[in-house]
Image (cartoon, rainbow, N blue to C red):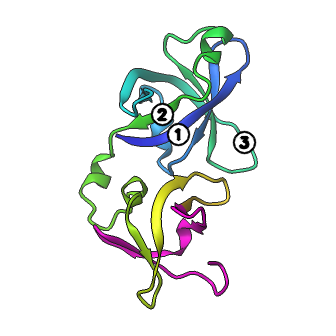
């Protein structure tokens, strides 16, 4: 399962919620799409089926959607979803792509610069509207945009002088 978004808050009185979509695959919120509410252990929990959605037109294009899930019909029910992480299985065209960057798999890998010097180990991925960030175990942050290659052991970054 891949984390694809988060429920931010309730929207209106008819059970709609605002969803921050952390993927560029907007089909995740199309009508009849199934999303999984991740449980506290990080595994898939309840299935939430999209009954309708629309782009919210906010300041970060494509990231926030107003979504109505089947069976969530009141504001009180929508409020219960606040903060829920949403997940989905990889799309079929993603699963077979050897060049795909699965950011969740970067956690635990060693980060090295272009000279091969170790920078630190990835401890988390921070979803940020300006661009996702790799958090190193010492707390330093590296924008995901600076990742130029990766393998099963390490992540190679090309960072500007002085960033680290």
Horizontal relation, residue 121 to residue 140: left or right:
left
Q: Does the magenta-highlighted stretch encompass residue 129?
A: no
Q: Earlier in the sequence, mark 2 or mark 1?
A: 1
User: Label 1's element?
Assistant: strand
The residue sitting at 38% across, 57% down in the picture is: 102
Which residue carries the number 2 mark?
86
The residue sitting at 57% across, 21% down in the picture is: 81
In the rendered view, tell whether residue 24 sits above or below residue 116. Answer: above
In the rendered view, tell whether residue 152 sits above or below residue 37. Answer: below
C-alpha span from label 3 to label 2:
21 Å
The residue sitting at 68% across, 22% down in the picture is: 10
Are the residues flagged by discs 2 and 1 in contact, CB closer than 8 Å?
yes
User: Label 2's element?
Assistant: strand
The residue sitting at 50% across, 54% down in the picture is: 124
Residue 148 drawn at (x, y percent): 45, 77
Q: Earlier in the sequence, mark 1 or mark 3?
A: 1
Q: Which numbered disc covers residue 124?
A: none
Horizontal relation, residue 94 to residue 32: left or right:
left
Residue 108 drawn at (x, y percent): 38, 60
Which residue carries the number 1 mark?
5
C-alpha span from label 2 to label 1:
5 Å
Q: Does the magenta-highlighted stretch encompass residue 140?
A: yes
Q: Residue furthest front?
A: 138
Residue 2 drawn at (x, y percent): 39, 43
Which numbered mark, 3 or 2, is in the foreground of this view? 2
Q: Residue furthest left?
A: 96
In the rendered view, tell whether residue 18 sits above or below residue 146. Answer: above
Q: Earlier in the sequence, mark 3 or mark 2?
A: 3
Residue 78 drawn at (x, y percent): 62, 16
* The residue stretch that appears in magenta: 135-164
Which numbered mark, 1 or 3, is in the foreground of this view? 1
Neighbor class of circle 3 (other Cα within 10 Å; few <14, some 14-19, many 20+) is few
């Amino acid at each position: 399962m891949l984390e694809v978004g988060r429920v931010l808050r309730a929207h209106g009185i008819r059970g709609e919620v605002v969803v921050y979509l952390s993927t560029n695959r907007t089909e995740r919120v199309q009508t009849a799409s199934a999303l999984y509410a991740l449980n506290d252990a990080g595994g898939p929990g309840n299935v939430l089926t999209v009954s309708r959605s629309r782009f919210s037109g906010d300041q970060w294009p494509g990231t926030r959607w107003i979504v109505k899930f089947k069976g969530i019909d009141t504001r009180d029910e929508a409020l219960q979803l606040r903060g829920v992480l949403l997940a989905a299985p990889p799309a079929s065209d993603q699963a077979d792509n050897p060049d795909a960057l699965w950011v969740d798999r970067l956690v635990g890998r060693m980060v090295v610069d272009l000279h091969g010097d170790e920078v630190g180990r990835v401890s988390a991925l921070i979803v940020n509207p300006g661009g996702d960030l790799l958090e190193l175990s010492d707390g330093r942050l590296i924008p995901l945009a600076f990742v130029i290659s990766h393998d099963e052991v390490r992540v190679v970054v090309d960072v500007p002088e002085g960033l680290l």
